[in-house]
């Protein structure tokens, strides 16, 4: 569960900007019973909304989170070795143009098999400073008990380890010199994987992050479509129920799959797929899903007299498509405890649905 995210000197953010998910101490739990989760003696908001004018940085805040996630997961990738770090600092001030960007996140995970944990949940605080040439600083703290413990700190090539962070000391001893452009945490994760008892919990938490960007060139309905493609499952019924609740006239949906050769696709679709593949080769044969929606047909007396199939892409409204693309990830988030960012959630949606 996300508690706090901090970013400084990145894109449109010159000064430190903080998203804090903790409820104010002046708020009683009964006042926001449906919006608060009590965990580790903290009242945490289950959702927040960020408001602001155009060009005020709302989308860039999401980009900051996405950069941190990508850098944690991939900075130790051998394919990135020697390449400049793809970071953009705040460009409108001479004070910051040569300074590193800073990212820090605080979150809660179930303790499960975490060593040293005395409570049901453990709070981690992890962050780093980075410019295009190197990781300048990196730090990891954990609250296994009521008191926070420093697990490791990094000042460029210099590392300090707490005795509790044995996996880090072992990797540093094995490697000797660490890659200046990679996060030490990422190096541990890539080498030891799930055998690193503390690092694995942090790396896995970043996998829980999802985002929906409204300004993407193509609407991504694939997640929701895949969730309704397996018979009468509870999750499929939940989606159909959500569509009915939205009062957009859809009573049922079917997914039809057909296989086409990738070179038969329009060039702009291929370019989009390549960008999403992040350098990986695209298959020569692509499975395309076609969605069909079921609507009721009525006579002059408004009695139901039959059913009609609509082609989802050609015949449904832009608002319906937008709602459909969002509802699957939302349900997955609620069922599995993920973290979901939705950029411009109100785009093409009725205020009531928002």
Image: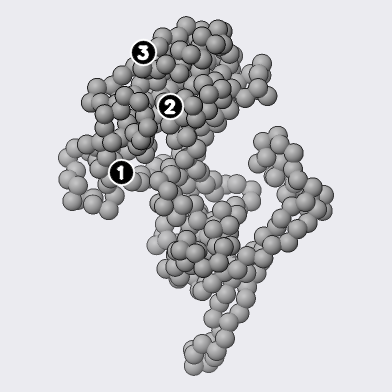
- For the residue pair 137 and 323, the one nearer the viewer reads as 137
Is 344 placed left or right of 278 in the picture? left
Q: Residue furthest bottom?
A: 301
Crowding at label 1, few (<14), some or many (≥20) Cα neighbours within 10 Å?
many
Q: Nearer the viewer, mark 2 or mark 1?
A: 2
Q: Is residue 176 visible?
A: yes
Which residue bears the numbered disc 3? 163
Residue 264 vertical position relative to residue 173 in the rendered view, above or below:
below
- At 56% from the left edge and 11% from the top edge, which residue is drawn? 175
Residues at marks 2 and 1, CA–CA distance in whole angstroms: 28 Å
Q: Earlier in the sequence, mark 2 or mark 3?
A: 3
Pointer 2 local density, CA inside 10 Å: few below 14, some 14–19, many at least 20: some
Give me the C-alpha separation between circle 2 and circle 3. 14 Å
The total number of labels drawn is 3
Q: Which mark is residue 197?
A: 2
Front-lying residue, 294 or 187: 187
Q: Quadrant of residue 280?
A: top right
The residue located at (66%, 16%) in the rendering is 82
Q: Name the residue tied to disc 1.
A: 45
Give the mark, 2 or 1, whose residue is nearer the N terminus: 1
| Image quadrant in which the N terminus is located | top left
Q: CA distance from mark 3 to mark 1?
A: 34 Å
Q: Which of the two marks, 3 or 1, is nearer to us in this view?
A: 3
How far across and down, in percent of the image, does residue 281 sit? 74, 39
Which sits earlier in the primary sequence, circle 3 or circle 1? 1
Residue 319 in view (yes/no): no
């Amino acid at each position: 569960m996300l508690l706090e995210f901090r970013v400084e000197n990145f894109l449109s953010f010159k000064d430190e900007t903080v998203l804090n998910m903790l409820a104010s101490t002046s708020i009683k739990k009964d006042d926001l019973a449906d919006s608060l989760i009590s965990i580790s003696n903290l009242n945490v908001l289950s959702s927040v909304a960020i408001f602001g004018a155009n060009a005020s940085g709302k989308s860039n805040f999401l980009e900051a989170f996405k950069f941190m996630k990508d850098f944690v997961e991939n900075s130790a990738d051998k394919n990135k070795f020697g390449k400049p770090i793809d970071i953009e600092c705040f460009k409108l001030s001479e004070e910051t143009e040569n300074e590193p960007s800073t990212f820090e996140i605080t979150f809660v995970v179930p303790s499960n098999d975490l060593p040293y944990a005395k409570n049901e949940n453990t709070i981690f605080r992890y962050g780093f400073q980075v410019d295009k040439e190197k990781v300048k600083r990196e730090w990891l703290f954990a609250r296994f008990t009521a008191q926070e413990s420093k697990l490791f700190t990094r000042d460029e090539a210099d590392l300090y380890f707490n005795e509790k962070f044995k996996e880090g000391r072992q990797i540093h001893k094995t490697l000797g010199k660490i890659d200046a452009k990679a996060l030490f945490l990422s190096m541990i994760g890539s080498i030891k994987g799930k055998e690193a008892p503390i690092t694995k919990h942090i790396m896995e938490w970043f996998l829980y992050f999802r985002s929906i960007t409204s300004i993407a060139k193509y609407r991504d309905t694939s997640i929701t479509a895949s969730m309704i493609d397996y018979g009468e499952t509870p999750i499929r019924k939940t989606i159909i129920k959500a569509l009915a609740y939205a009062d957009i006239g859809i009573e049922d949906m079917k997914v039809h799959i057909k296989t086409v050769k990738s070179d038969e696709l329009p060039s702009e679709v291929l370019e989009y797929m390549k960008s999403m593949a992040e350098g990986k080769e695209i298959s020569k044969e692509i499975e395309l899903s076609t969605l069909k929606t079921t609507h009721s047909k009525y006579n002059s007396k408004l009695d139901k007299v039959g059913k009609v199939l609509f082609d989802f892409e050609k015949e449904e409204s832009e608002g319906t498509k937008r709602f459909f693309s969002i509802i699957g990830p939302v349900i997955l988030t609620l069922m599995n405890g993920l973290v979901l960012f939705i950029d411009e959630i109100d785009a093409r949606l009725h205020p009531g649905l928002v």
